[in-house]
């Protein structure tokens, strides 16, 4: 059933996007590993790592688009799910350090030794196994989203109120994770990673593999989103976005739909965070910062809300811009540029870059009803009176 | 206590043969009494027009029936013994009560076809819709409804591009697709041209052959076109009931509504 469901979504456009993402996922690591550093085709490792980070951002943007673009839930707290996934992976990587830490304790990570803790807290159990960490990467954001969504959607919290409590959620987690006695490394977070699955995390080959994994996760995420949107379920989501009460009066229990897509989206964001951490080499409470979640929304808006490809393009574009800007003397103006970009896109490209291109390229004639043709004249006439 | 129980038992007996049964329904919002002891009985297969000045409680009555608003007191029963006050919108809709809003409310970014397809009686649960595959029977049913509401040649149009009247019909089509036993229609002729209004009356009469319909309407010509029993609401309760001619002659009605 699930195979049929996912295969059904494999139309031409989806196949092309998947091929491009996976193609880049294979090509760049190969160019990094197989070419000589002096070759014009050589991709330096730092570029690979940077682009790998962008790919995880793109997956985060995709997850935001799934709920915002198609179901109208504007989440200003998706960074929380991203960070939770990141912490899940970070905890595994911490346990992988073993006795190679500064204090040489084979069980306890450095920060726990520093805090004079005598044994591993119960919630760190199991993180020495990759499969367990991978499960938590999905379950922790998924569970948080499920509980949050259960209460919020049942109480019919919508619109700006929902956005505000998502901000509050990520801010509360930010404060919580800053505390040392939470057991997640306090404000330093988790870092100094050595190995992942037994491979040196700094090695070029590992970086290449992580880059490919990020591309593959993005491709899979895109495919799942396409399948969801193409199904009747996806049509109900759009119906909820357009006219929520109409959807209820037709007989759909809207909160159930929101809960399913919200939880799915949070799990995607969690996977993005988990792939982000080994490439960046650190996870700290800063990832919960409300600004991060808002930035993800800007990527989606810039690329094109409700297009699935748009958020990927938007995340890449904005982050290229950020890297370029913040590495020069204009660094301190970046936030102004970002804010200005958001304003400009909202005013002049409300459908985003990809959304506008798609409308332009669409050959399907949109027949206008007569009223609309008449309306401007009527409006002008009224204005003249 | 037996004295107070007696009317309830009688009421239930009465509710059993009716399709929709409202008894002594009261609703207030912040002290404003939107409904005060409203009682109304709709028989199976009946078509009823409800008129009344603004603020008479017509929309609140629909909200109560469809589960959007819970009454402070009173009974609301559907098909005899189903207590609607205990159910939410989605389950009431699945029970077979369809509602058309005053302002046409369709899914603007869906095609005409998808609007009907979404309303089609059948799967409603998230995981069922996720894996649902459209059947031949469903396609035939959507086509049939599009024929009825005269939008078959606009099946691939986005609903946003329809005219006001066409949106009203599309919404009626969505109600039909739900295969309801009772249709609640709020001002179907609002903002329509005369030709569209007449066609809407024909459409509703056609629908009323197989289903019970409650129409809330301001337009007297339209109500006359329908030619059905009329209930006049005023300040949250029933003022008068009968054929349009009877209620038009009722001095109370003339005073509050028609006389203005």
Image (tube, rainbow, N blue to C red):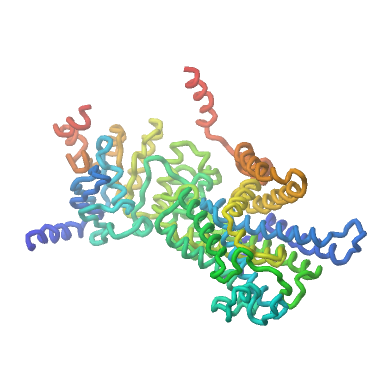
Q: Is residue B183 left or right of residue A359?
A: left
Q: Quadrant of residue A212?
A: bottom right
The C terminus of chain B, quarter of image: top left
Q: How many marks?
A: 0
Residue B136: % across, % down = 51, 60
Query: Measured from the top left, where is residue A304 in percent x and y?
Result: 63, 47
Residue positioned 33% across, 51% down in the render: B68
Where residue A378 sits: x, y (%)?
A: 50, 24
Q: Quadrant of the N terminus of chain B?
A: bottom left
In this picture, residue A200 sits left or right of residue A284: right
Is residue A23 something that shows in the picture?
A: no
Give me the residue at 40% from left, 32% from top: B195
Answer left or right for A316 relative to A145.
right
Drawn side of residue A125 relative to residue B17, left or right? right
Question: At 76% across and 44% down in the image, what residue appears?
Answer: A329
Q: Confirm whether residue A138 shows in the render.
A: yes
Given residues A153 and A382, the one toward you in this image is A153
Q: Place residue A286 in its image quadrant.
A: bottom right
Horizontal and vertical percent for residue A104?
Answer: 70, 80
List the single residue furthest toward the top.
Answer: A385
Q: Nearer the viewer, residue A149 or A82?
A: A82
| Of residues A90 and A256, the one drawn nearer to the viewer in this rendering | A90
Q: Nearer the viewer, residue B59 or A206?
A: A206
């Amino acid at each position: 059933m699930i195979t049929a469901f996912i295969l059904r979504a494999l139309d031409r456009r989806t196949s092309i996007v998947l091929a491009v993402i996976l193609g880049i996922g294979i090509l760049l690591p190969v160019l990094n590993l197989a070419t000589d550093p002096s070759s014009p085709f050589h991709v330096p490792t730092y570029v690979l790592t940077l682009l790998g980070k962008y790919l995880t951002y793109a997956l985060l943007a995709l997850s935001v688009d799934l709920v915002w673009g198609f179901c109208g839930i504007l989440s200003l707290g998706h960074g929380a799910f991203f960070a939770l996934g990141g912490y899940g992976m970070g905890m595994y990587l911490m346990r992988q350090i073993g006795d190679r830490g500064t204090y040489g304790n084979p069980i306890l990570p450095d920060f726990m030794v520093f805090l004079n803790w005598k044994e591993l807290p119960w919630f760190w159990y199991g993180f020495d196994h990759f499969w367990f960490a991978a499960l938590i990467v999905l379950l922790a954001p998924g569970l948080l989203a499920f509980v949050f969504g259960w209460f919020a959607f049942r109480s019919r919290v919508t619109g700006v109120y929902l956005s505000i409590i998502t901000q509050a959620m990520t801010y509360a987690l930010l404060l919580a994770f800053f505390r040392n006695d939470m057991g997640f490394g306090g404000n330093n977070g988790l870092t100094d990673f050595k190995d992942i699955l037994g491979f040196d995390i700094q090695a070029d080959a590992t970086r290449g593999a992580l880059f490919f994994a990020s591309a593959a996760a993005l491709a899979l995420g895109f495919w799942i989103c396409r399948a969801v949107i193409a199904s009747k379920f996806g049509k109900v989501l759009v119906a909820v976005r357009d006219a929520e009460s109409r959807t209820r009066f037709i007989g759909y229990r809207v909160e159930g739909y929101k809960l399913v897509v919200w939880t799915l989206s949070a799990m995607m964001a969690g996977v993005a965070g988990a792939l982000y951490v080994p490439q960046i080499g650190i996870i700290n409470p800063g990832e919960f910062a409300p600004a991060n979640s808002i930035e993800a929304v800007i990527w989606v808006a810039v690329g094109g809300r409700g297009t699935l490809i748009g958020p990927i393009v938007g995340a890449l574009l904005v982050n290229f811009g950020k890297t370029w800007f913040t590495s020069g003397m204009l660094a301190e103006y970046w936030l102004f540029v970002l804010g200005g970009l958001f304003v400009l896109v909202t005013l002049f490209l409300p459908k985003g870059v990809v959304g506008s291109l798609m409308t332009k390229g669409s050959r399907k004639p949109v027949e206008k009803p007569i009223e609309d043709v008449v309306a401007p004249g009527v409006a002008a006439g009224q204005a003249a009176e | 206590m037996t004295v107070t129980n007696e009317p309830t038992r009688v009421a239930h007996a009465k509710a059993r043969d009716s399709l929709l049964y409202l008894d002594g329904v009261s609703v207030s919002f912040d002290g404003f009494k939107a409904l005060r002891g409203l009682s109304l009985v709709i028989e199976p297969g009946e078509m009823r027009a409800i008129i009344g000045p603004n603020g008479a409680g017509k929309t609140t009555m629909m909200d109560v029936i469809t589960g959007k608003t819970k009454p402070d007191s009173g009974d609301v029963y559907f098909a005899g013994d189903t207590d609607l006050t205990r159910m939410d919108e989605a389950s009431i809709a699945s029970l077979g009560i369809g509602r058309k809003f005053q302002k046409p409310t369709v899914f603007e970014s869906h095609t005409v076809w998808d609007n009907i397809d979404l309303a089609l009686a059948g799967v409603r649960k998230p995981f069922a819709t996720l894996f649902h595959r459209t059947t031949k029977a469903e396609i035939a049913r959507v086509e049939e409804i599009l024929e009825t509401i005269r939008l078959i040649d606009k099946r691939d149009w986005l609903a946003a591009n329809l005219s006001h009247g066409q949106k009203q019909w599309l919404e009626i089509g969505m109600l039909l697709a739900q295969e309801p036993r009772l249709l609640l229609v709020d001002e179907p002729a609002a903002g329509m041209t005369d030709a569209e209004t007449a066609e809407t009356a024909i459409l509703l009469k056609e629908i009323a052959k197989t289903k019970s319909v409650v129409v809330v309407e301001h337009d007297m010509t339209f109500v006359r076109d329908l030619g059905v029993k009329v209930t006049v609401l005023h300040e949250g309760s029933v003022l008068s009931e009968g054929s349009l001619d009877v209620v038009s002659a009722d001095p109370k009605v003339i005073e509050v509504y028609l006389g203005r």
